[in-house]
Image: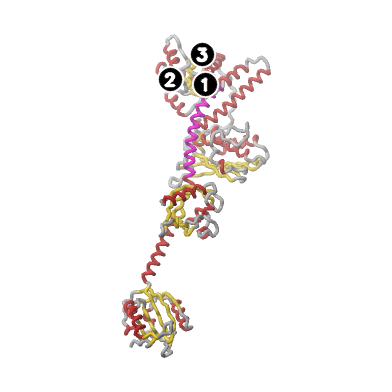
């Protein structure tokens, strides 16, 4: 039987409330009310004396089924034992207690309740009771669980995304309320260090030079109330600089004022570097076109100087004149060497491709460096004879290593260590490209390292620019790295570098391995041939060149060695001379770059008139395209301006002899 409530109850003002008023209030409560005895607190627990209708509705048990039983009949296997013990301890001490428990309805359905339990004494009988007020919080717990699951799912999603999600206050300091786990990888800081600005603020992580621009964009976003996207730099905890892209939006509060920002920040450093390299490549191509034209004209200037110096040396009347002519010739050769670097940079001039063994290449560069660099620089070259060969031009590859080594030595004015080594490397098709010029395949990686001053951050984007140099006047042309880059690119390779100020630099040259079947590189130094220069026997040579000085010096050189010479200033004049049946030519030397009827068309026309006529091509900018065009029309010999008198005579002799045989 349900025990009746005490007949009266006291309110805070001391007025006695009739029990029927109290009962009516309890009957109408949505919360469950349970009154029990106070003994025994321990197992099996006090018996139920009273339950209200809300209890019956929530549990499915009638009052008759509940009264006289312990509250344990509502509990099950998943009800928290620690919480039950805590409630028992509080009741034993007659102190109020609050807890959340899992109970079970009559049909076995679990439901959560928030319990407030306290001890009370009847004013009329002085009897003690325990009163339990319970509220069904199942929906709240379900919502909380769903929220936690959503947060867990979002956290899992954010942890798998390459970047950092955030939510920050619009308080002028961008105080973070939430950042995802990607914070660590992006900034080097743990999320806890940034949330609430505990260790640092995100504004402090933004690169100082970009903070003003970022704040201005955020301000405009606030004014318009729309989403924003911006790109800027950050400085990580370790001091590294990264490019990031931020996409975000402002979140207004109930009053319409923006209270929060939220968004996503991703690392775009690699993409930014690739974009920069693409722009640099385009700039270099433009400069290369200009430089190529200048180099072509300079070669036409140096060619007569070199050849005239050789011819006049044999006719000089005294030793002093010979010395002066030697100075002129040496200066012309030096200028020609500089022009060759310009051409290598501008057009990637290709020489013969052979299988180059690194051990031989390293041996040659070691000999040169030992005799050139100061003794304060220790040279460490590791030769690995087991590495496969490289398909390339030995002379050009030698120049690449020489340029990099000289730059390394210049970075160590007080001495240091220059190290050159090689190893196998590969670029997988599925991996990100380490460089825009990289293609999948097997490479030999040659590292040239120094312990010098390093490359400052501000200069790293300029070091491959032609004519850029940090050296003083007269100490360098600024073509070393740009030439090396052009040579390596023409070999279908690429160059990367790492550097730290005052900690040295390492340039890595990646070159494809040679394919099987290539001939071995010619070893040994290229010494001047001891065979005397052959003389002509009155053979008639047609020289076609638009430069008058080049025509004049070639005529003098050929005639000095027993040839007869007729000159033409362009292709049309050369064709007219060949059509004259009274004029017979034994050889034609044709410049490939001429205005109007160019060298290629001139060769085609001459071949049409005289298919058996030996032709030698000549150019101040001998690109592979020029050579291929000439070779397709039967031209087997080529002169690269500026050339020596000996080279001209020997080439003319070989061309006529091989054609005759």
> Depth-wise, is mark 1 or mark 2 nearer the camera?
2
Residue closest to the eye, 447 or 69? 69
- Please give left or right for residue 249 compared with residue 400 in the image: left
Residue range in magenta is 272-301
Q: Quadrant of the N terminus?
A: bottom left
Of callouts 2 and 3, which one flags the residue occurring earlier in the amino acid sequence? 3
Residue drawn at point x = 43 percent, y = 82 percent: 13
> Depth-wise, is mark 2 or mark 3 nearer the camera?
2
Q: How many marks?
A: 3
> Alpha carbon of mark 1 to alpha carbon of mark 3: how far?
15 Å
Label 1–label 2 contact, CB within 8 A: no
Q: Which residue in the protein does label 2 denote? A: 597
Q: Is residue 614 visible?
A: yes
Percent x, y of residue 613: 44, 17
Quarter residue 121 falls in = bottom left
Main SS of residues in magenta: helix
- Residue 390 sits above or below residue 235 on the image: above
Q: Helix, strand or loop at disc 1?
A: helix
- Residue 201 sits above or below residue 336 on the image: below
Callout 2 crowding tier (Cα within 10 Å): few <14, some 14–19, many ≥20: some
Quarter residue 406 falls in = top right
Of callouts 1 and 2, which one flags the residue occurring earlier in the amino acid sequence? 2
Disc on res. 565: 3
- Please give left or right for residue 133 compared with residue 562 in the image: left
Label 1–label 3 contact, CB within 8 A: no
């Amino acid at each position: 039987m349900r025990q009746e409530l005490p007949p009266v109850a006291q309110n805070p003002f001391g007025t006695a409330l009739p029990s029927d008023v109290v009962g009516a209030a309890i009957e109408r409560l949505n919360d469950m009310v349970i009154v029990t005895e106070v003994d025994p607190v321990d197992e099996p627990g006090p018996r139920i004396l009273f339950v209200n209708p809300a209890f019956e509705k929530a549990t499915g048990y009638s009052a008759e089924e509940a009264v006289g039983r312990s509250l344990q009949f509502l509990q099950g296997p998943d009800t928290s034992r620690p919480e039950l013990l805590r409630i028992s301890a509080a009741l034993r001490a007659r102190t109020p207690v609050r807890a959340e428990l899992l109970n079970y309805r009559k049909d076995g359905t679990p439901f959560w309740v928030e319990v407030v339990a306290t001890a009370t004494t009847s004013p009329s009988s002085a009897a003690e009771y325990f009163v339990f007020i319970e509220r069904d919080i199942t929906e709240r717990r379900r919502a909380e669980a769903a929220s936690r699951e959503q947060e867990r799912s979002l956290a899992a999603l954010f942890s798998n995304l390459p970047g950092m999600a955030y939510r920050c206050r619009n308080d002028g300091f961008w105080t973070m309320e939430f950042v995802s786990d990607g914070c660590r990888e992006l900034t080097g800081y743990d999320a806890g260090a940034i949330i609430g600005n505990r260790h640092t603020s995100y504004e402090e992580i933004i690169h100082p030079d970009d903070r003003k621009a970022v704040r201005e964009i955020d301000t405009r976003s606030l004014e318009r109330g729309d989403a924003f996207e911006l790109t800027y730099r950050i400085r990580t905890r370790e001091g590294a600089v990264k490019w990031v892209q931020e996409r975000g939006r402002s979140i207004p509060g109930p009053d319409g004022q923006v209270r929060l920002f939220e968004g996503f920040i991703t690392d775009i450093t690699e993409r930014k570097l690739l974009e920069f390299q693409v722009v640099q490549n385009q700039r270099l191509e433009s400069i290369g076109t200009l430089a190529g034209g200048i180099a072509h004209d300079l070669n036409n200037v140096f060619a007569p100087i070199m050849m005239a110096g050789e011819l006049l040396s044999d006719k000089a009347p005294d030793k002093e004149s010979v010395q002066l002519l030697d100075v002129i010739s040496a200066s012309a050769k030096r200028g020609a060497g500089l022009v060759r670097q310009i051409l290598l940079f501008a057009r990637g001039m290709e020489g013969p491709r052979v299988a180059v063994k690194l051990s031989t290449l390293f041996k040659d560069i070691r000999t040169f460096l030992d005799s050139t660099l100061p003794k304060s620089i220790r040279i460490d070259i590791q030769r690995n004879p087991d590495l496969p060969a490289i398909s390339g031009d030995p002379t050009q590859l030698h120049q690449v290593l020489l340029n990099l080594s000289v730059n390394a030595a210049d970075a160590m004015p007080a001495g240091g260590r220059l190290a050159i080594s090689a190893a196998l490397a590969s670029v997988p098709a599925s991996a990100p490209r380490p460089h825009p010029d990289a293609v999948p395949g097997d490479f030999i990686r040659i590292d040239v390292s120094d312990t010098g001053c390093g490359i400052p951050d501000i200069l790293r984007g300029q070091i491959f620019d032609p004519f850029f140099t940090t050296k003083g006047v007269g100490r360098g042309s600024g073509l070393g790295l740009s030439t090396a880059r052009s040579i390596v690119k023409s070999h279908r390779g690429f160059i990367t570098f790492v550097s730290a100020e005052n900690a040295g630099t390492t340039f890595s040259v990646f070159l494809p391995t040679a394919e099987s079947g290539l001939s071995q590189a010619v070893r040994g130094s290229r010494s001047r041939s001891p065979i005397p220069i052959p003389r002509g026997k009155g053979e008639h040579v047609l020289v076609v060149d638009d430069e008058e000085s080049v025509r004049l010096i070639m005529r003098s050189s050929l005639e000095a060695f027993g040839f007869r010479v007729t000159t033409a200033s362009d292709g049309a004049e050369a064709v007219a001379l060949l059509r004259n049946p009274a004029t017979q030519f034994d050889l034609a030397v044709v410049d490939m770059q001429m205005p109007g009827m160019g060298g290629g068309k001139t060769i085609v026309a001459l071949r049409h008139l005289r298919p058996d006529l030996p032709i030698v091509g000549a150019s101040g900018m001998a690109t592979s395209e020029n050579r291929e065009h000439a070779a397709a029309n039967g031209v087997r010999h080529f002169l690269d301006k500026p050339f020596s008198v000996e080279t001209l005579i020997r080439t003319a002799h070989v061309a006529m002899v091989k054609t005759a045989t």
